């Protein structure tokens, strides 16, 4: 049975409408990603206390930061094809429920080795991003998919800023009621684990895989959705054969990779370089993450607007400019010796970084529609490869400041690779037709 799967995709984003499958998926994807991101980096703002308890060396701290993002590379590669095969609803629910286990485990760690082990496993929940982008990509039409992807991911990414700002206060509140510091950080880490379980149940209850329904039910009606017949390896191979995927892999390493590296080290940077207290450092670090509330969405919105006149080539050019801006202000941030100037330059650097992330995934749905899960997974893994590389670079540097300068230069270099992305005239015409159909459908609905 042949059915036009794009027919029921949402052509507009109505934030306060919870009645449609697309908008329920939109709100649940960003909420799930927010909670996962919160749990993923919940340890980071508490590291000054954890370092003291376990007497961690510089190398051990670096190992913990690397562990936090390493396993995500593998899981992101796997999770995209799983979405293609089993649907995002089942995949996300399983990740949330299973992923909560190491979050509870890290709170019970009693040595460097056990803390490192659970910190490694927690990294698996970073794969939540791929499911978020997959789910919104199949729910929204080409005219708004960039905005939908970037907004859902941006609001979810804000969990990284929220955890920086809130976790020190949760711990402080526990200490105020008589809990000692050694128990306080452990009790605080139970909060994100509990939230993951709650949201996992909600995801199962309130979402469906596609505009037509769950993949299992739609396939039972003879409609082809996702990649039921393809194995995960076949989906990955098809995506990996597309050179554009690897350019975006590099560009995402340069924006999201830097973003999650900053989440891991920025609170400690403010403590060591500017003598901030734990709460002050958390609030300053929180600015970086909380900007994702609007900045990542802005990257997707700008990409969608540029695409109205410039098509796919316009999307690549805006991504190139955003990554260059990110590199410039990262270099400036690394050279600031005043706390106020550091915060200002970090804020502008964060703006470009989040917008570049949004612009990257505004381009992802147009790379290869037949292997969307594989494309999203490989490019998403690129972000974590960038973070791991940055972690190893830090181990070889004298200090964080020197590392940030080197990273700014590398971001510049990586950004230029985007200029090598090309699309055939047939590809452009096909995507432009789908884009125009979505615009026409949205206009007809508005007139009805």
Image (cartoon, rainbow, N blue to C red):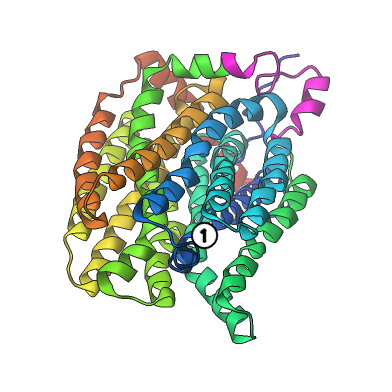
Q: Position of residue 174 (x, y in %)?
A: 62, 79
Residue at image coords 24%, 73%: 339
In which quadrant of the rendered view does residue 278 lie? bottom left
- Residue 300 appears in the rendering: no
In which quadrant of the rendered view does residue 340 lie? bottom left
Q: Position of residue 319 (x, y in %)?
A: 31, 39
- Residue bearing mark 1: 43
Quarter of the image with the C terminus in it? top right
In which quadrant of the rendered view does residue 363 lie? top left
Is 444 left or right of 246, judged from the image as shown?
Answer: right
Q: Give, as a single range, the part of the protein colored magenta.
A: 209-234
Q: Position of residue 365 (x, y in %)?
A: 49, 30
Residue at image coords 22%, 57%: 401
Judged from the image, the secondary structure of the residue bearing numbered disc 1 is loop
Position of 185 relative to 80 (above/below): below
Q: Nearer the viewer, residue 185 or 256?
A: 185
Is 372 left or right of 270, judged from the image as shown?
Answer: right
Q: Nearer the viewer, residue 441 or 425?
A: 425
Residue 223 included in the magenta stretch of the image: yes
- Label 1 packing within 10 angstroms: few (<14), some (14-19), many (20+): many
């Amino acid at each position: 049975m042949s059915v036009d799967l794009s027919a029921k995709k949402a052509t507009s984003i109505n934030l306060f409408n919870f009645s449609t499958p697309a908008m329920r998926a939109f709100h649940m994807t960003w909420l799930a990603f927010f909670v996962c991101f919160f749990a993923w980096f919940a340890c980071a703002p508490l590291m000054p206390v954890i370092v003291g308890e376990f007497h961690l060396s510089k190398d051990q701290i670096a190992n913990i930061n690397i562990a936090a993002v390493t396993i995500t590379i593998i899981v992101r590669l796997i999770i995209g094809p799983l979405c293609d095969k089993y649907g995002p609803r089942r995949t996300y629910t399983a990740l949330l429920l299973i992923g909560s286990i190491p979050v509870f485990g890290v709170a019970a760690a009693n040595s460097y080795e056990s803390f490192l082990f659970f910190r490694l496993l927690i990294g698996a929940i970073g794969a939540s991003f791929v499911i978020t982008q997959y789910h919104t990509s199949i729910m929204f039409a080409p005219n708004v998919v960039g905005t939908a992807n970037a907004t859902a991911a941006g609001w979810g990414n804000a969990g990284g800023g929220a955890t920086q700002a809130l976790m020190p206060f949760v711990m402080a509140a526990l200490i105020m009621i008589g809990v000692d510091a050694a128990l306080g950080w452990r009790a605080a880490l139970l909060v994100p684990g509990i939230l993951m379980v709650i949201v996992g149940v909600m995801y199962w209850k309130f979402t469906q895989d596609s505009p037509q329904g769950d993949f299992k039910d739609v396939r039972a009606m003879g409609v082809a959705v996702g990649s039921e017949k393809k194995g995960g390896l076949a989906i990955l191979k098809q995506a990996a054969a597309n050179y554009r995927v690897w350019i975006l892999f590099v560009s995402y390493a340069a924006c999201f990779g830097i973003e999650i590296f900053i989440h891991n080290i920025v609170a400690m940077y403010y403590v060591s370089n500017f003598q901030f207290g734990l709460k002050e450092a958390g609030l300053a670090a929180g600015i970086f993450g909380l900007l994702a509330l609007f900045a990542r969405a802005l990257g997707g919105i700008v990409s969608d607007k540029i695409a109205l006149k410039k098509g796919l080539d316009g999307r690549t050019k805006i991504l190139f400019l955003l990554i260059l801006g990110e590199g410039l202000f990262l270099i400036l941030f690394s050279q600031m010796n005043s706390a106020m100037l550091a915060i200002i330059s970090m804020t502008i650097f964060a703006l470009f970084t989040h917008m570049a992330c949004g612009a990257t995934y505004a381009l992802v749905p147009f790379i290869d529609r037949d292997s969307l899960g594989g494309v999203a997974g490989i490019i998403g893994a690129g972000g974590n490869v960038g973070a791991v590389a940055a972690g190893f670079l830090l181990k070889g540097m004298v200090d964080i400041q020197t590392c940030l300068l080197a990273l700014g230069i590398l971001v510049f270099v990586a950004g230029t690779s985007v200029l090598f992305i090309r699309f055939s005239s047939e590809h452009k015409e096909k995507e432009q037709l789908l884009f125009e159909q979505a615009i026409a459908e949205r206009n007809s609905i508005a007139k009805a």
